[in-house]
Image (cartoon, rainbow, N blue to C red):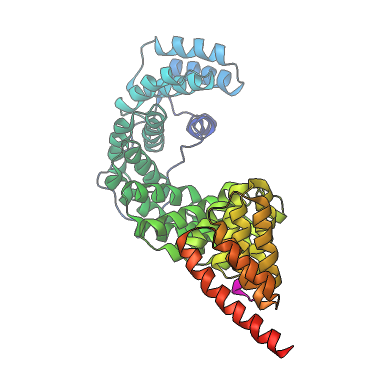
Amino acid sequence: MMFQPSERMMSIVAGFCTAVLLAVAAAPSGALAQEAPKPELERKEPNALMGERAYRRFDSLVQHYTNSDYQEALKSAQAYLSSELSDYERAMGEQIYGYILIAVDRVNEAVPHFETAVELDALPNSAHFNMMRALAQLYSSREEWQKSIDMMTEYFRYQPEKTPEDQIMMAQNYAQMERYREALPWVRGAIRDAGAKAAESWHQLELAIHFELKDFRAALDVLKILVSMAPQKLSYWEMLSGAHQELNQDTDALAALMAAYNAGLIEEEKKLLNLVRMSMFVELPFQAGQILSAAMEAGRVAPEEANLRLLLQAWTAAREYERAGRVIDRLAPMTGEGDLFMQKARLMMEQNEWQATVDAARQALEVGNLSNPGGVWLMIGIGTMELGELREARQAFQRAQDFDAKIRSQAREWQRFVEDRIQVAELRN
């Protein structure tokens, strides 16, 4: 007597693929028959009948599996397969044996049984094609990329349409083999067919392929999608910036990072300093100063020497001389460099802040270690002269002449000018 397996039994067997291999999805339901595209090949539905003895053994085997009694299920499967069976009966046994092995974490041992189930070509269409797809997924998990590609290529010949998930599997296989140009049409097809339901990871795969191919313009298009999907992910903004840099679009590269910064995504010291330097590079020193100053106040960037020098550079380039001077007041005591106060004196002179000029220059003399002490005395002379302290100015100009020839020449000219003003003042008195 022959038996058609019960609906319960068939649903259990058909469900193994989903229950055990989560990545393996059932074939998609198509449109109406008259509208659905036709596959390249049609497979005739095999005769799914079991003999009475095989049926009872198989039913017992399924019971053990569904009760999670895997050791008994293994014994039953071995006994079942050791008996004389038709191709259909054996294919069913090989299939369930493979799933039992997966359930006990013996995945590699399951693969040959699945291969036999497919090679027998006796399972019902739904089970046969699901088995092919499950095998392709297993090959991928074993890093047998070409075998997965070959299995899926054969599988596609019997499918009216390629699902987005199937196309992604193919794209991943080719990408893993570094065959990026072959991977690209598959991932693009998956994204196109899935539309708004395309997974973020699929766009990530396309992005990785473009980067490998050094197609940064195409990468920009993908990154714009990714930042719209997940604007909270800093890595996407950073990659967007990097792609613009590869295309020598430095302003756009900075704009991408500034969008992330304004969203509160950039908080690490290293990344904040990179943003400051990029701002300086594209000649936005005021922006650089604002970012770095705020980061120091928030405790995200340490107020150490190198960072303070960068802040001084930003404020100086932005002609924010008072702010630059305050940075020098913090930096100079750290370094013991009198030249920093000399730099402050020059900044104050730029603003005609004569008392501040003189004070900074005198601080420079107090700290010492000056590269140009004559220049410091020259600034003291000019500052005191502008403050009306002519005799002090004359003394400063005299001191300035004790140093290099260039300063000596300038100091003499200033000294003559000051002496003339002193004589005029004396005559008036």
**Residue 321 in sight in this render:** no
**Residue 362 in sight in this render:** yes
Residue 178 relative to residue 15: left or right: left
Q: Work out which quarter of the rendered image holds the C terminus and state it.
A: bottom right
* Residue 422 in picture, x, y percent from top left: 66, 80
Q: Residue at x 46, y 53 (%)?
A: 239
Residue 119 occupies quadrant: top left
- Report the front residue among 225 and 39: 225
- Report the front residue among 428 and 131: 428
* Residue 28 in picture, x, y percent from top left: 43, 48
* Residue 24 in picture, x, y percent from top left: 46, 37
Toward the left, the furthest residue is 40
- Report the front residue among 84 and 65: 65
> Which residues fall within the magenta stretch?
349-354
Q: Work out which quarter of the rendered image holds the N terminus and state it.
A: top left
Q: Is residue 422 inside the magenta stretch?
A: no
